[in-house]
Image (cartoon, coloured by chain):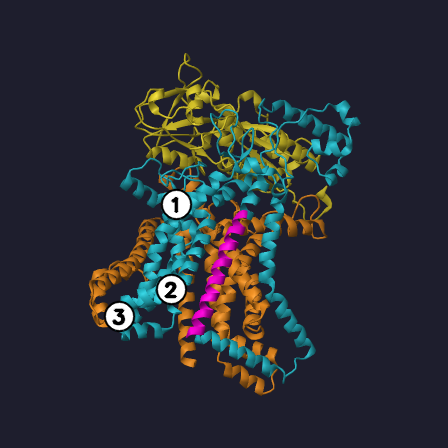
Chain colours: A orange, B yellow, C cyan
Amino acid sequence: MDVQTPQLHFEPGEREPELIHFRAKSRDWASCLFTGLTGLATWLILGMLGVILVNILVNGWTGLSWRFIISNSDQDMFDVNKAGVLPMIVGTAARVILMTLFVIPVGVTTAIYLTEYARTTSLLTRIIRGAVNNLAGVPSIVFGLFGLGFFILFVGGLMDRSVLGGGPEPRWGKPAILWASLTLAVMTLPVVIVATEESLKAIPQGLREASLALGATKLQTILQIVLPQAMPGIMTGGILSVSRAAGEVAPILFTGAAYYMASYPKALTDQFMDLGYHVFILSTQSPNIEQTRPILYATVVVLLLLTFALNFVAILIRTRMRKQMRALH
Amino acid sequence: MGGSLPFSASAGNITAKGSDTMVILAQKWAELYMQKNPDNKIQVTGGGSGTGFAALQNKTTDLANASRPIKPKEVSACIKAFGKRPTEYKVALDGLSVYVNNESAIGELTLDQLDGIFTGKIRNWKEVGGGDAPITIYSRENSSGTYEFFKEHVLKGKDFAASAQTMPGTAAVLQAVAKDKNGIGYGGAAYGEGAKHLKVKKDETSPGVEPIADNIANQSYPIWRYLYIYVNPDLDKAEIGAYLKWIRSDEGQKVVEQVGYFPLPKNWRSGS
Amino acid sequence: MAESRQTSGRSHGWMGLRRGHQARPLEWLGEKAILGVSLSAILMVFLIFLFVARESLPVLLGLADSGVYHEPVSLEEMARMPRGELADYLDLSAAEMERMDEATLKLLMEVKAEEIAAAPEDKDARINTVSWPYLLLPHQWTGYDKPEFIWQPVSAIHKYNVVPLFIGSLKATLVALLFAVPLSLAAAIYVSQLAAPRTRELLKPAIEMLAGIPSVVLGFFALIVLATVLQNTFGYQSRLNALVAGIALGFAIIPVVFSIAEDALTSVPRSYTQAALALGASKWQAAWKVVLPAAIPGVFAAVVLGFGRAIGETMIVLMASGNASIVSWNILDSTRTITATIAAELAETVVGGHHYRMLFLLGTLLFAVTFASNLVADLIIHRLKARLEGKA
């Protein structure tokens, strides 16, 4: 958030001419105009971002209290004085942590293959990259359908029919935190792959060659030399995927989010309450929207703080990593 | 059935799923009942009446809360799943109000006029005695029991006008009408502030009836419905049976009033 | 570019060195496992398509029937009916039919008779509304004055015309593109070509911060704040409409369009700009007349990806578009999009029913559209990079 606020007060007109004078040799009016316009567009985007954030923070701050964060909605989730978001925070945290357990091993392994093993020109590599890019562009609601069709009905159905099932009532073939996490893991796979790849590429080739020259095998080199060096990048990927997944609602609509639950999820097959879904419920289904506005805004602030803090940390790590990389090459 | 299996729904664990209209009511029932019977654990989720029936078929819930009666299709799905018709319990009454903006000149409408407005035949307020302004219709998502009830009873099965905006909840309808001078919408009579509740006339000659508690309880207000709970008859015993009985007792019906719905007539309640 | 050339060079060096250090048997297995896991992305794309399409297959192939009228069959006739026909009549699959005992079948017959008795007398009752003509062409339904495109899945006659939803999605997406593309392209030119390096370091992550706002929060903002502000400013009739949803969608795609366009512009070799400046051009002229033309395929790819993202976005349109399924190109009318329809209706449907299958069909179409736009964008970027590399 620190990054945006100063830009709100920035006057576009002040600096543009300076830039022109400093850079350009010819001073035709078209250059001045268009540079000004493009600059204006840039600051306009940031201004609107600022307006959104300021509106949410100003309105949300009043409703936000320690009690709101650490209490649950046992009484009434629409009661301004009693409602709390702890169950939603717990639910959201549980589903993203569970997700990282699936997505990080798979994502990192794929990135290792792409940077350390694959020939950049081979058809297979190009197909894998194409698939990763495509996965990044699949609409989130389609992931929701996929989660329902594949994880719940197919995988869950199979498990119910096997020894894991619990008799006539489906145990696995219904919405659950496990399926929501798996669906999100598929969705955020590209995030982890791209971030890890970037960090693997940043590691100087000399390190690998030195390791090999000392008689290590390739896998040893990767596991003991390359991976430890790539840790910041893997962390960035993990954090970015968590931040992306934490705010997603569409993929969990049919795969595990609950409108209301009296207890916390305790098993992989339980449903959960979720911050983002709760924002949706509060803004569309509260019995009295004016009265519940403070808790709505406060819930949005909690969700935003969570995703932005994660994003911010990831960007910090990445910027530092990029600088290191530049220094090394 | 699952009794011999260690991980089937354990004793005293009851799940109820369905109508969003009934979530808060069901939750209050559950809380009060759990206070009195600490061995029982009752979990309530919403999603809509259809969701509840789907879950009943899939056996992912014990009780299906519904703000409309079950449809033959859903009955046959249940029969396919567990070989029996689900048992129906009427558990409360609910009135549906028609809301207009507070500034609107309209105070009452007949059922026919409502039919005309919501199907899109009447498009201007002046056709029903208001000012010259186009009518904006606010409706609910087709997954809601309220939507189906209104369509069934006021529109007599006809389609809503395509131009009707669909809102995800009654509150959203109310808020939209509160902000729109030319808006009209519908929703639970218990929801209230922000917009005017119209009086409704059965026909041209009958008097307009206000959607207030007494008129709904004695059924003189024409747009009302039952709220239901459906259960697999195999499960309707022990803890679940006791819970259902308690809901329909005087004590359970007191909760109905607190939440803003209307209790069952005395002779329909279960003696407890 | 230099970076990717280096990558390919390095990769071969890696391969060459590998020959000297044979992997041990266990490691060989490990390396195969790595290859196996890395195929998961391909597998997932394949599974997504397979399992979303699978649920919609009966509709796609015209095998589903949503007609609501059947001749009632009495219990006496039931005994004489062939099992297959009876199964059809009762909507039972062959496997389900196997499991049914006589009592359950009787019960089903009873319910079916009730259903038929309750069905309205309607000239449209025999129509299979999930067949292609009714999905795509207008039809004059009972109670309507003229042929119309109607999406009314919960109705006595289930009407599944997808045209209003496609128009709704396209309308919201177009507004989003009109709003977001000029802004993000201008910002991309400014940030990559005109801004001082230090400002640039700050601007890029700041704009990309926009991507960190969850779409449900943008939807909330559009619903609670933006809709009111816009209506008060322009004074139009319906508060929630394609304009409000489109602008909020625009916020969601600005970071996408900006990042990719900025990448494309930055990947044009510095020497192009330097040459232009040396010839006496201003910074703006160099950016507009030299760099932008060289990067134009990348800019196009950015727009294509923005389109894919906007058409697939769910929560924003669900909350801010008003969701009325009307055929109208007026952006001030409320609209219902494909994604919002899936999100709002799926939870209610019976698994395997025609409404459920129709929503999966919408999902399949959505997947196909975004798959195509991703593929196009991917190919364009790939070519552009190759070309710029070759020239550099």
Residues in magenta, as a range: C365-392
Q: Gap between marks 2 and 3, in whole Å?
A: 21 Å
| Residue C11 as seen in the image, left or right of residue C229 | right
Q: Do the CB atoms of the residues marked 2 and 3 lie less than 8 Å apart?
A: no
* Amino acid at pointer 3: Ala
| Residue B90 as seen in the image, left or right of residue B137 | right
Task: Answer whether residue C373 is magenta in the image.
Answer: yes
Q: Chain of mark 1?
A: C
* Amino acid at pointer 2: Glu
Q: Quadrant of the C terminus of chain A?
A: bottom left
Please state the horizontal and vertical placement of residue B224, each as a whole percent of the image: 48, 24
Please state the horizontal and vertical placement of residue C191, each as a whole percent of the image: 32, 65
Q: Gap between marks 1 and 3, in whole Å?
A: 42 Å
Residue A270 appearing in the image: no
Foreground residue among C126 and A295: C126
Please state the horizontal and vertical placement of residue C104, each as a whole percent of the image: 73, 31
